[in-house]
C-alpha cells in the first residue's frame, strides 16, 4: 500500500481512506452454477458495510504507497501479499514487484490529481519529546535556544520561515535494539495515568473520539466563518489548509484505528467519528460560499501572480478538488453530481466487498483426489483464492475456473460503477473519467498512458514469448504424461498449451532450479533488528537521518508489540515519528501499508507540525531463542514501506494538503520503489546482513543469485501488468463501452498478454484495484521507470553518495505534492524523460547480469 492517497470522496476536504474495507469473518458465498464448471478428472502425481461508512472513503482509494499491484490470488512470489486484483492465476507482479506494499500499499492508487492523506490540526497534539542531542554529538553547531528549542538556520522545502529544531530526548535507543528485545511497555507504570493513542490525551478511552471530533467540528465552523470573511490573499490558502487539517487529523487517525485496534470499543468509536466527520465533509464540499472565497482569489490575476509557487499550486489543487465534485455547476447539476458521488461510493464499497467473496461448488463436481485442497462445507467446496502456488495442475485449474466464475450481481455493480464514473466526469467537463483522473499526474492524459503501455508491450513481446516457451518446457518436463494420457480439458485446449494458471507456479520452479534460491537459507542473515539498523545506516549516510527507538507511554500504542521510532536529522533535529506495527496478531488486516496519521505543515506560530505515520507489516514474532527473521521478500518489502515513511518525514511542505506522500499516484510510489534498488545492491546489504548466530556476512554470490532470479520470467510478469493497466484504461475510456466488460477483457488479454481467455470466467470481477486505482493502474509501471532512472543516474555508481542523497531530498522528497511531478523528476534527472526513456529503462532492467554467472562459475 503506499500512503495517503486522495480519499474517494470528491471535494477538497477528504479524510485519508483506509487501505481496505474490513471484511466479515465469514461472508455469504455465492454458489457456482453446476453445469458451467468443467474440470477434467485426470489425476496428477503430485455483509456489506453501511453506505455512510463507505462514504468516508474507508479504503476504496488507497494509494500505491499503501498497496502495490500484486498477483491475482492475493499472494506474491516474494512474500509481499496485499489486497490486490486477483489477476490471471495470480502471477507475481512486475520485476521486483510487488499488494499491496504495494504499496497500498497505500495508494493502492488513488486520487484524481495529487493524492491526499490524513490532515490534522495541532491543538489535539502535545508537542513531541524534544529531539536530537544527536545534532550536537554529530558536530552540529549550537544555536540559540528559544522556548526550550533551537532555532534552525536551514530552510526546508522552500519554507521561508526558519524552522525550530526540536530538543534531544534522552529516552532514545539504537533502532536495532528496539526490535531485538521484547517490548517492556506492559511492565511500565501499571498504576500511572494512562495516555492517549498517538499521544492524543483525549484518546485514552474510546469515548475520547467523541471529544476529539466535537473539538474538530467546532474549530471547523470557526474556520469556515473566518475564511469567508477574509479578503482574498495568501491567508485564504492557509485557512483552507488548516480547515482541511482540523478535520482529517481526527478522521485519518480514526480511519486507522477502526481497522487496526484490537479492542472492539475503540474500533466502534473510531467508526462513529469517521461518520461524524464524513457528514461535515459532505457539507463543506457543497458549501458554495466557501468555494467562492477561493474563486475570488484565483480570479484576481495580480493576486495570483504575487503568490509563491507552492501557495499557488495548493490553491489550484483546492479549486480542482472543488470543481471535480461539481460545485461550480448550477443547482440542478450540482445536486446530480452529489448524487452520483454518493452512488459511486456505495457501488465502490459493494464491488470491493464482492471481489473478496469466495465461490462455492457442489463437491461432487470436483475430482475426489483434489477435494481435500479446498474447505468443505456440507455438500459444497468453498474456493476463496486462485491457489496459484499449488503444485497440482488440477487444483490450480479448478480454483481458477470456480473462483473466477461470473457473479451476476457483481457484474451489474461493475457496469454501474464504470457508467456512473463516466457520467460524473462528463458532468464536470471531462470527455472521459480517465481524463479527469489523470489531470496533474506525470502522464497527464490517457493518450500518453496508452502510448506508454503500447510501446512497452511491443518491446516486451519477444521476451514474453521466450518466457512462455520456457514455462511451457518446465510444464511438460514435470508432466510428460499429460501429452499422451490425459484428455484435453473441456476438449478446448491441449495439455501442452500454457494456461493462465500455469506461469506463477512454473516460473517459481524455474527460478529455484536455475539459481538454487531457497528463502530459508537467507532468513538467518535478515534478522529484523539488523535490517532496521541497515536502514538507519543507509538513511544516515545518504540523508543525515537516523532512526531511534523511543519508549511509548502507557496507552500511546494499540498493541504492546508496536514500536515507536523517532526520525532524527543530524542538524535539523526531530523530523517526525514512525509507529511500527510489524507483527502478526489475530484479526489484524493482512496488509503491508503506510498510513499517514498526521501530516506535516508550518503552523502560524512558526513551529512545524511533525508528521506521524504508521507502517503496518505482518511479520512473525520473535521467540526466546530466535529473533524475527525475514525472507528476502519481506526484507525488500520493509525497505519499500520505509521509502514511503521517509517521503512523509522529509516532505517539509508549508501545507499539509501536499505533504509527503500526498502527491500524484504515478509519482507517489517512486521513493518506495527506489528503496527496492538499494535493498538489492550488495554494497548496501553487506552493511547489515549477518547471520544472527555466527555473525557471518551474507556471501556476495547469494545476493547476486537472488537478484538475478527475479529476472526469470520477469518479462511475462511485466506483460501481465501491462494488460491490467490497459484494461483499466479501456474501462474508464470512452462510453458507452463497445461491448461487455467480459468481451473487452478477452480482447485485451489476447492483445496485451497472449495466454488464452478461459470461457465462463470473469477475472475483472476480482479486479479490486478498479476501485482505488481507477484509470491509474499504470502508475506502478511508470513509478518503477522513474525510480530506475533515478537509481541509474544518481546511485548505481555509489549507493551511499551523500551529494546525490541531498539532491534527491531537495528535488523530489521535500516538495511532497507541492510541485508538478514531472518538474521534480526533471530536477532530479537534469532532463525531461520521454515515454521512450521510460520504456527502455523498464526493459533494460530485465537484462541478466553476466557477472553473476561468472561469479557462480568460479
Image (cartoon, rainbow, N blue to C red):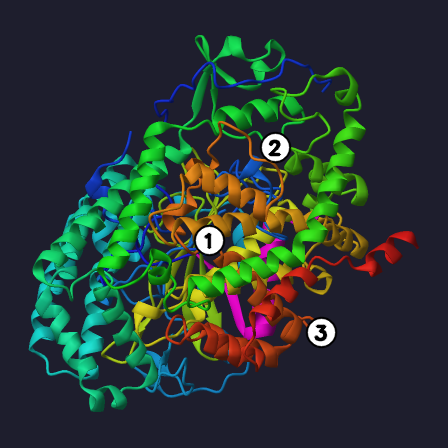
Q: Which mark is residue 797?
A: 3
Q: Position of residue 45 (x, y in %)?
A: 73, 17
Residue lying at the far front of the rendered structure: 738
Q: Give the secondary structure at mark 2.
A: loop
Disc 2 crowd, CA 10 A, few/some/many (<14, 14-19, 20+): many
Q: Is residue 11 left or right of residue 727?
A: left
Q: In front: 182, or 294?
A: 294
Residue 77 counted in the magenta span = no
Circle nearer the N terminus (2, 1):
2
Residue 624 in view here: yes
Q: Where's residue 530, x and y in %?
A: 63, 54
Q: Is residue 200 left or right of residue 481?
A: left
Please name the residue shown 44% across and 71% down the image: 650
Secondary structure mostly seen in magenta is helix
Mark 1 lies on residue: 777
Q: Residue at x 57, y 78 (%)?
A: 829
The crowd level at tag 3 (other Cα within 10 Å; few <14, some 14-19, many 20+) is few
Q: Is residue 188 visible?
A: no
Report x, y in % for residue 281. 17, 56
Q: Is residue 529 magenta?
A: yes
User: Which region is colored magenta?
Assistant: 525-550
| Quadrant of the frame with the C terminus | bottom right
Q: Which residue is mark 2?
A: 501
Locate residue 425, reporting x and y percent: 28, 57
Amino acid at each position: 500500500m503506499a500512503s495517503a492517497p486522495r480519499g474517494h470522496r470528491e471535494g477538497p476536504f477528504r479524510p485519508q481512506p483506509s487501505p481496505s474495507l474490513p471484511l466479515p469473518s465469514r461472508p455469504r458465498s455465492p454458489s457456482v452454477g453446476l453445469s458451467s464448471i468443467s474440470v477434467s478428472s485426470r489425476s496428477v502425481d503430485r455483509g456489506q458495510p453501511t453506505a455512510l461508512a463507505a462514504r468516508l472513503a474507508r479504503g476504496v482509494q488507497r494509494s500505491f504507497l499503501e498497496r502495490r499491484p500484486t498477483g491475482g490470488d492475493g499472494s506474491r512470489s516474494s512474500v509481499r501479499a496485499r489486497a490486490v486484483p486477483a489477476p490471471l492465476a495470480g502471477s507475481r507482479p512486475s520485476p521486483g514487484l510487488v499488494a499491496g506494499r504495494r504499496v497500498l500499499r497505500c495508494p493502492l492508487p488513488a486520487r484524481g490529481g495529487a493524492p491526499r492523506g490524513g490532515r490534522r490540526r495541532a491543538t489535539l497534539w502535545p508537542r513531541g519529546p524534544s529531539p536530537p542531542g544527536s545534532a550536537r554529538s554529530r558536530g552540529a553547531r549550537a544555536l540559540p535556544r528559544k522556548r526550550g528549542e533551537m532555532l534552525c538556520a536551514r530552510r526546508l522545502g522552500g519554507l521561508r520561515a526558519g524552522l525550530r529544531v526540536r530538543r534531544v530526548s534522552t529516552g532514545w535507543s539504537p533502532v536495532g535494539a528496539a526490535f531485538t528485545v521484547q517490548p517492556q511497555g506492559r511492565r511500565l507504570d501499571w498504576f500511572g495515568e494512562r495516555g492517549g493513542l498517538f499521544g492524543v490525551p483525549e484518546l485514552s478511552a474510546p469515548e475520547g473520539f467523541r471529544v476529539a471530533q466535537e473539538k474538530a467540528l467546532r474549530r471547523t465552523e470557526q474556520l469556515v466563518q473566518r475564511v469567508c470573511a477574509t479578503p482574498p490573499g495568501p491567508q485564504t490558502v492557509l485557512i483552507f489548509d488548516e480547515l482541511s487539517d482540523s478535520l482529517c487529523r481526527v478522521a485519518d487517525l480514526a480511519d486507522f484505528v477502526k481497522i487496526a485496534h484490537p479492542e472492539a470499543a475503540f474500533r466502534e468509536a473510531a467508526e462513529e467519528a469517521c461518520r461524524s466527520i464524513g457528514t461535515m465533509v459532505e457539507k463543506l464540499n457543497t458549501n458554495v460560499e466557501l468555494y467562492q472565497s477561493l474563486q475570488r482569489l484565483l480570479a484576481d490575476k495580480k493576486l495570483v501572480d504575487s503568490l509563491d509557487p507552492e501557495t499557488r499550486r495548493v490553491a489550484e489543487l483546492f479549486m480542482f478538488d472543488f470543481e471535480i465534485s461539481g460545485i461550480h455547476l448550477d443547482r440542478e447539476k450540482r445536486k446530480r453530481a452529489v448524487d452520483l458521488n454518493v452512488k459511486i461510493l456505495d457501488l465502490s464499497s459493494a464491488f470491493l466487498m464482492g471481489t473478496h467473496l469466495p465461490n462455492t461448488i457442489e463437491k461432487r463436481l470436483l475430482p475426489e483426489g483434489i477435494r481435500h485442497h479446498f474447505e468443505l462445507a456440507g455438500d459444497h467446496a468453498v474456493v476463496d483464492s486462485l491457489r496459484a502456488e499449488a503444485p497440482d495442475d488440477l487444483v490450480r485449474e479448478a480454483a481458477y475456473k470456480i473462483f473466477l466464475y461470473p457473479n451476476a450481481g457483481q457484474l451489474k455493480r461493475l457496469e454501474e460503477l464504470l457508467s456512473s464514473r463516466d457520467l460524473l466526469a462528463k458532468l464536470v467537463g471531462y470527455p472521459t473519467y480517465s481524463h479527469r483522473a489523470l489531470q496533474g499526474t506525470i502522464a497527464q492524459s490517457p493518450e500518453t498512458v496508452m502510448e506508454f503501455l503500447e510501446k512497452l508491450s511491443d518491446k516486451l513481446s519477444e521476451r514474453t514469448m521466450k518466457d512462455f516457451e520456457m514455462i511451457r518446457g518446465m510444464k511438460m518436463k514435470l508432466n510428460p504424461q499429460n501429452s499422451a494420457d490425459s484428455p484435453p480439458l473441456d476438449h478446448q485446449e491441449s495439455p501442452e498449451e500454457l494456461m493462465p494458471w500455469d506461469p506463477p507456479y512454473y516460473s517459481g520452479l524455474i527460478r529455484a532450479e536455475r539459481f538454487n534460491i531457497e528463502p530459508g537459507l537467507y532468513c538467518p542473515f535478515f534478522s529484523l533488528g539488523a535490517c532496521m539498523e541497515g536502514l538507519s545506516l543507509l538513511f544516515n549516510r545518504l540523508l543525515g537521518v537516523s532512526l531511534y527507538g523511543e519508549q511509548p507511554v502507557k496507552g500511546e500504542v494499540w498493541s504492546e508489540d508496536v514500536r515507536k521510532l523517532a526520525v532524527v536529522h543530524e542538524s535539523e533535529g526531530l523530523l517526525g515519528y514512525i509507529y511500527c506495527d510489524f507483527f502478526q496478531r489475530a484479526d489484524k488486516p493482512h496488509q503491508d501499508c503506510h498510513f499517514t496519521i498526521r501530516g506535516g505543515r508550518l503552523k502560524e506560530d512558526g513551529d512545524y507540525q511533525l508528521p506521524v505515520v504508521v507502517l503496518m507489516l505482518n511479520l512473525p514474532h520473535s521467540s526466546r531463542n530466535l529473533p524475527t527473521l525475514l525472507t528476502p521478500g519481506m526484507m525488500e518489502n520493509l525497505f519499500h514501506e520505509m521509502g514511503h515513511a521517509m517521503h512523509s518525514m522529509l516532505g517539509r511542505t508549508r501545507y499539509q494538503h501536499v505533504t509527503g506522500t500526498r502527491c500524484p499516484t504515478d509519482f507517489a510510489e517512486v521513493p518506495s520503489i527506489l528503496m527496492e534498488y538499494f535493498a538489492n545492491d550488495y554494497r548496501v546489504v553487506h552493511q547489515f546482513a549477518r547471520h544472527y548466530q555466527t555473525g557471518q556476512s551474507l556471501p556476495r554470490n547469494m545476493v547476486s543469485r537472488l537478484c538475478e532470479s527475479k529476472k526469470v520470467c520477469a518479462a511475462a510478469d511485466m506483460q501481465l501488468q501491462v494488460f491490467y493497466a490497459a484494461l483499466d484504461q479501456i474501462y474508464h475510456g470512452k462510453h458507452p463501452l463497445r461491448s461487455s466488460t467480459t468481451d473487452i477483457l478477452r480482447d485485451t488479454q489476447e492483445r496485451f498478454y497472449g495466454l488464452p481467455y478461459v470461457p465462463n470466467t470473469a477475472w475483472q470481477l476480482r479486479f479490486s484495484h478498479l476501485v482505488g486505482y481507477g484509470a491509474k493502474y499504470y502508475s506502478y509501471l511508470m513509478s518503477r521507470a522513474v525510480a530506475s532512472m533515478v537509481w541509474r543516474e544518481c546511485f548505481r555508481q555509489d549507493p551511499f553518495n551523500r551529494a546525490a542523497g541531498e539532491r534527491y531530498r531537495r528535488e523530489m522528497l521535500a516538495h511532497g505534492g507541492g510541485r508538478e511531478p514531472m518538474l521534480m523528476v526533471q530536477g532530479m534527472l537534469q532532463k525531461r524523460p520521454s515515454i521512450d526513456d521510460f520504456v527502455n529503462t523498464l526493459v533494460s532492467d530485465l537484462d541478466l547480469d553476466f557477472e553473476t554467472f561468472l561469479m557462480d562459475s568460479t
